[in-house]
Amino acid sequence: MSQPVAAVRAPRPDAAGAVIRVGEVRKAYGAVQAVDGVSFEVAPGEIFGLLGPNGAGKTTTMEMIEGLHQPDAGTIEVLGLDVRRNASQIKHRIGVQLQTAALYPQLTVEELLRLFGSFYGRQRPVDQVLEDLELGEKRTAQTKTLSGGQRQRLSVALALVNDPEVVFLDEPTTGLDPAARQGLWQVVRRMQGEGRTILMTTHYMEEAEALCDRLAIMDHGRILEIGTVDDLIGRRFQERGVRFLRRDAPPEDQLRGLAGVTRLVAEDDEVVLFTRDVPATVGALLELTTRAGTEPADLMIRRASLEDVFLDLTGRALRD
């Protein structure tokens, strides 16, 4: 259960085959533009991720697709149906795991699953759901006694009681320890293996890389980039990153002028020099800091990552 999960890259959707279509969707709350012209499509059987910090507009976007909120503008289709006109039809074919869910603390796990199953004409056997989510030993436990990881698995189980074609997962592993997070990743991959299409939000880079066939990077209500992890990195970086702490670092104009450096990205506590010639850049950096009587702290060299893409797009790192 704790084995790492490798991502399987799904093809991009074609115009006729998309399970979810979102076109120029906007949503404002007063003066705050929560979602600002978001567009994307999700292919059948794909795990598509919305990656971004809290407040990026991920949850608002997802809730509009689920039919929980009406967009101010734009179009949304799920399973070929317009969400505005066919909300009741769609709700019987989708499963929704909410970021915060009230789990009726006095009910047992089994009672809660049967209650939610009674809301639908189509149901999965409760025993099967309990087995799939590894909750069999907790079937008679009251939900208030569950651990954080067990509550998250139960929340996902409730999204599966109606055997949905499309599953929405909103920050499904927030607050979980690494072992519990890996366990839920296995569950998500199993859902995909059953032929379900999954739209998920996350602010964990590792989770996006492990699970998502494609993802959209969101910030301030907008989508900045869409693609596979390899696509996103390849479009912006052909270099390696020379990373070190900003403390006692030379001025940025001197760092930009070092041999091999193609660009510099700085945050509050770190500097990353992207270079096509690592030996030349590191040698010039050490020479520069030696003359100043310092040295680059925590110097590290690595290939560009999804975090570098986010940093390059937004000017800041995405923190857990």
Image (cartoon, grey):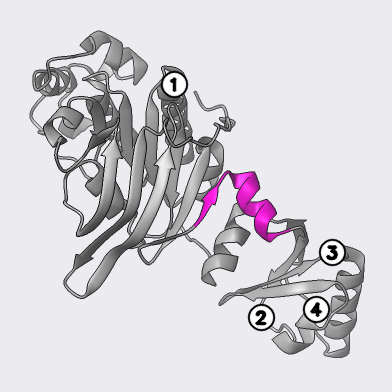
Q: Which residue is mark 4?
A: 295
Q: 303 above or below 187?
A: below
Expressed as whole percent of the image width and height from the top left, the position of residue 229 reads 60, 46
User: Between disc 2 and disc 4, whose residue precedes?
Assistant: 2
Kindly identify which residue carries mark 1: 190
Mark closer to the chain start, 2 or 3: 2
Is 303 above or below relative to 96?
A: below
**Bounds of the magenta span?**
225-237
Q: Position of residue 62 (x, y in %)?
A: 29, 47
Residue 276 numbered mark, or none: 3
Q: Amino acid at mark 4?
A: Glu
Q: Nearer the viewer, mark 2 or mark 3?
A: 3
Q: Is residue 302 visible?
A: yes
Residue kind at label 3, given as amino acid type: Arg
Q: CA distance from mark 1 to mark 4?
A: 48 Å
Left or right: where does residue 116 sit relative to residue 126?
Answer: left
Q: Would residue 213 be counted in the magenta stretch?
A: no
Q: Quadrant of the C terminus?
A: bottom left
> Is disc 4 surrounded by few (<14), some (14 to 19) or many (20+) residues within 10 Å?
some
Looking at the rendered structure, the secondary structure element under dot 3 is loop
Q: Which residue is mark 2?
A: 247
Residue at the (72%, 73%) spot, across then down: 263
Q: Is residue 203 above or below residue 167?
A: below
Query: In this view of the protein, which residue sits in the foreground, 147 or 302?
Result: 302
Q: CA distance from mark 1 to mark 2?
A: 45 Å
Q: Are marks 1 and 2 in contact (CB under 8 Å)?
A: no
Q: Earlier in the sequence, mark 3 or mark 4?
A: 3
Q: From the viewer's perspective, is the residue at label 3 or at label 4 nearer? A: 3
